[in-house]
Amino acid sequence: MAVIHHTVVKPTKLELLTSWLPSRPWYRGSADGPAPAKAGGFRLDDPEGEVGIEFIVVTDASGPDPTTYLVPLTYRGAALEGAEHALVGTMEHGVLGQRWIYDACYDPVAVAQLLALIAGRAQAQDQDSSDTPDREVTASLAGACPAHTEFTATEDQDSTMLTTPQGVTLRLHRVLRPEPAADGPLLAPRGATGHVAGAWKTPEGSRVRGLFAVLRPGKRD
């Protein structure tokens, strides 16, 4: 299990996101820059213990209406070769030293663990505590889950789409929308073979749930 170090980091994650978010096609905040505030999230463990994986939920109130974003990040002790375009920034960690921060949609370790979560082979972990499962994060699989091979990433105004050569798609919802309250866990949308859902806090202080990622099947022979 990953160990959460309660220490000083410079710049902070929110400071990095303040600079990075306006560069994204799904950013909807003010042209003067966002004011992101932490609203939730969870972590996944890297089986090799080398890469930190965190799915951060932030709410930005800088635009006409508050917008909540899903921002998956990876934290590495060295630069990830070939991923310069996905670099969010670097920070100095009080315990671990310099860290390279990447958009996790372009980090193969994070994508593999997200697929493992959907397939039931990984457990979401609490964002702020070591060795503590996050029971608010739910996942399902009703079909085949691709072995992590190659994904091509494309982005639009709402999401990042990861597509395999066989046409399997893993869509990460970047702009989050709360689903209507229900007694049970959120279900995958029609036509999907898997999903991940979670909870976050609204600016008013209430807790809502929504879809984080959806897996859809590819081509049939």
Image: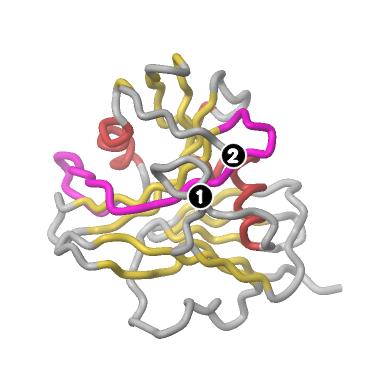
Camera sees residue 44:
yes
Label 1 environment density (alpha carbons within 10 Å; few <14, some 14–19, many ≥20): many
- Amino acid beneath label 1: Gln
Foreground pick, 189 / 21: 189
Quadrant of the frame with the N terminus:
top right
Camera sees residue 26:
no
Foreground pick, 162 / 203: 203
Q: Which residue is the site of mark 2?
A: 1
Q: Residue at x 42, y 28 (%)?
A: 5
- Residue sitting at the far right: 221
* Secondary element type, mark 1: loop
Q: Residue 125 bears which disc, if any? A: 1
Q: Residue at x 39, y 52 (%)?
A: 41
Tell me if residue 30 is in the magenta stretch.
Answer: yes
- Amino acid beneath label 2: Met
Q: Residue at x 73, y 49 (%)?
A: 148
- Residue sitting at the far top: 97
